[in-house]
Amino acid sequence: MDIKKIEKKWQEKWEKDKLNRFDPSDTERKKLYVLEMFSYPSGAKLHIGHWYNYGPTDSYARFKRMQGYNVFQPMGFDAFGLPAENYAIKTGIHPMDSTLKNIETMEGQLRAMGAMFDWSAEVKTCTEEYYQWTQWMFLQLYKKGLAYRKEAPVNWCPSCNTVLANEQVVDGKCERCDTPVVRRNLTQWFFKITDYAEELLSGLDTLDWPEKTKSMQRNWIGKSTGCEIEFECDGGEKFKVYTTRCDTVYGVTYVVLAPEHPLARKLTTPEQRDAVEAYIDYASRSNEIERLSSTREKTGVFTGSYCTNPVTGKKVPIYLADYVLYSYGTGAVMAVPAHDERDFAFATKYGLPIVKVIENRNGETVLPFTEDGIVSCGSPFDGLAGEEARGKIADHIAALGKGGKKVNYRLRDWLVSRQRYWGAPIPVIHCEKCGAVPVPEKDLPVKLPYDVEFRPDGKSPLAKCDKFMNTVCPKCGSPAKRDPDTLDTFVCSSWYYLRYADAHNGNAPFDREKVDKLLPVDVYVGGAEHSCMHLLYARFFTKALRDMGYLDFDEPFKRLVHQGVILGPDGNRMSKSHGNVVSPDEYVKEYGSDAFRLYLMFGFSYTEGGPWSDDGIKAIARFMDRVEKLVNKAAALGDLTKKTPSEEEKALNYARNFGILHVSEDMEAFSFNTAVARLMEFTNALYKYDGLSGEKDLKLFHDCVKDLVLLLAPSAPHFCEECWERLGGKGSVFEQPFPKADHAALVLDEKEYAVQVNSKIVCRVKIPTSYSEKEIEEYVGKLPEIAERIAGKTVRKCIVVLGRLVNLIVG
RNA sequence: GCGGAUGUGGCGAAACUGGCAGACGCGCAGGUUUCAGGUUCCUGUGGGAGACCAUGCAGGUUCAAGUCCUGUCAUCCGCACCA
């Protein structure tokens, strides 16, 4: 077969007949939205990762189409983002130019892959017609109170004089100039994802997602149930601490505020001023990575002030220490060194008292004792333990008016401002009189200007573009400035799956009716690296849009599958520095896109991935040759004769239906390697039958080859279209129904049983399937090998597993 | 430290609710086709001469364990001072 020719032939035909298009007007067939994570056009070419994501998933989509679903499988480009901008900084090529060029090449390659993408619904996030609606999303969230501005610490490179994304901080240093990164407070836009923390957590239970991904999200959201307790300072200031161990409140010997805590300076006495200032400065210098290391020695400083433990009335000193995170809980903790490892280490270092208030129920109490135990400190709660003690003490604190039970989440609000050029401008205008004013919807998009100095030299690139920055306030009409920041690219990808449903709508991001009909996505396939970012943000967007009345479902992705990673032949991750990058292009050129895809499906467990091997693809080429030979043979058959089925015909028909059944099951389960294995078995069965001497049932043979082609079609689309045509099939093979198994053909007259005596296999025999357990027992008892072994002994027990084995227990 | 996985022939990998471990393929061996090499097609292929031994290791439950339980080692991934 001339691979190149037939690939082109069928791709053109599919395009001409609009075979890959989703038909929204079709109400007969059930819709099925199959989605692969869209491509990021940072490089010019598709790599194996793209292929591995899109090839097998397309086969799944085609399989479902043949099963009678109205399948929607769109594709697009996540086109904004840092790599294009960094590339531009390095080479001087404008991000718009390089990105559009990359998209063009990748589109061509994606089409050459032969996937049934519905290109009529393509989206590119860097185009005005798309980011206009990304900006619209921002405005809706703002209206709903879900977008707000606040001062927050960011990674700051003092040399480049710019903010860095976390990914740009390598070992605490700026990735470009190696300058140590410091933390700095800047006013930034946030999305209030924390409002949805509880629903994002509980919604996970309804999803058909990998357990690992769900548990990662649960972890990320980090729900904890505890208690807030208010401490009052000698000067009258009050602050709250958060604890999950309020049963230890009698053991508090000091409290700690995060260095960024608003009361930090206020509570500092004149004698401590210098030490505290020095410490706050030190803490702000250390970066996130250093600071979060649990192995680092604890540091801190005394403020000079004291506060009162509301439960005991005792005065305790107030410290600042950077092991307390300002962003979690209340940014302040009560320290109980006897029952917390961190507090213990800190107290030991700074000579603070350690007071034991909990006793170990199961032995000696060795400090720090951090497990649950019995309260034992001369309090009214002595004798209580664990949950019960915490409940009663929290109630007591609430009764004192000093706090009470409180649920906390680790999830933080989503910082969406980026001091970067290549993204969607934040649609806000800053007016001296009116403050931050959202851009009126009718003025969208806020266009990203092309002529901008995007090399970083101190300010947001857009801030240096006067044409962009200078505008008038939509409220009062006085001169005003635009927000110079752009949106995190994860904002763009948080709603693209909705836009696909109505990709060319000029009046709205999408039509509600269309979206409600097509969504949610039935099967979403992509890399596991997005477990906590994209997949969480997209869920948040869906829930927020639902609450604003724009759509009517709770979760965007019903079923989620992560493909594995294809490694280099040496077992390492492919990378230029390893020199182990395998490019799909040469293989596609030599063996064709079908063979390449089929190898990706056969050679790996889909969710595991593994090292690339050249041998495997040759095996696939051979398999396709074998199929082609069968097709040619079947196509050449003249008068199709039929005969009364012999054992051989029955065996072939069994193999055929066994194949149909298992290929269907395996494709559904994304178990592509076993699906292909079943196809090979069926092929082998056809060869076996064909090799027999004597008269053949040519009709059966022909029908079996036809079924083989239909079963293989989703996984080798061009090849099977060609085979289908050779077999005299009409139209596209993808308009044919996927074969359905004839269960009657799978019922055998007899089955092979393993016969065991005392759990050891003695022999294997065929036993009619009509036999009852009793009959089976009698039957095997008479077999000579068995009779010999049980002679003179009593059969105590006989276990029969129908269709599989018999185990006689004798003694 | 916490959470999640993974560990099976020479290799990639199969094995449904516990029920014949190693499907399918690669590789290898023998035959076949071919002037010859490759190709094709067929057969064999976990180890061991053998009773037997084999799913990282050590125990346990069971008539029966790759699968369940306890402990342990190794590797990978995610989170990591979350009070």
Image (cartoon, coloured by chain):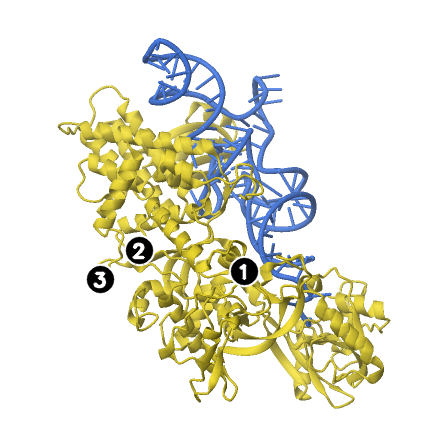
Q: Can residue A773 be seen in this view?
A: no
Q: From the image, state whether disc 3 or disc 2 is nearer to you.
A: 2
In-image side of A646 versus A287 (left or right): left
The subunit carrying tag 1 is A
User: What's the colour of chain B in the image?
Assistant: blue
At mark 1, the secondary structure is: helix
* Residue A790 position in % (x across, y down): 50, 28
**Residue behind mark 1:** A215
- Camera-nearest residue between A187 and A38: A187
In-image side of A180 versus A25 (left or right): right
Quadrant containing the C terminus of chain A in the rendered view: top right
Quadrant containing the N terminus of chain A in the rendered view: top left
Q: Which mark is residue A591?
A: none
Q: Residues within 10 Å of mark 3 (few under 14, many from 20)?
A: few
The subunit carrying tag 3 is A
* Circle 1: residue type: Ser
At mark 2, the secondary structure is: helix
At mark 3, the secondary structure is: loop
Residue A593's place in the image compared with A271, above or below, is: above
Sequence-first tag of 2 and 1: 2
Chain letter for the yellow part = A
* Residue A310 position in % (x across, y down): 74, 85
| Quadrant in which residue B25 is drawn | top left
Q: Which residue is drawn at 26% across and 25% down?
A: A690
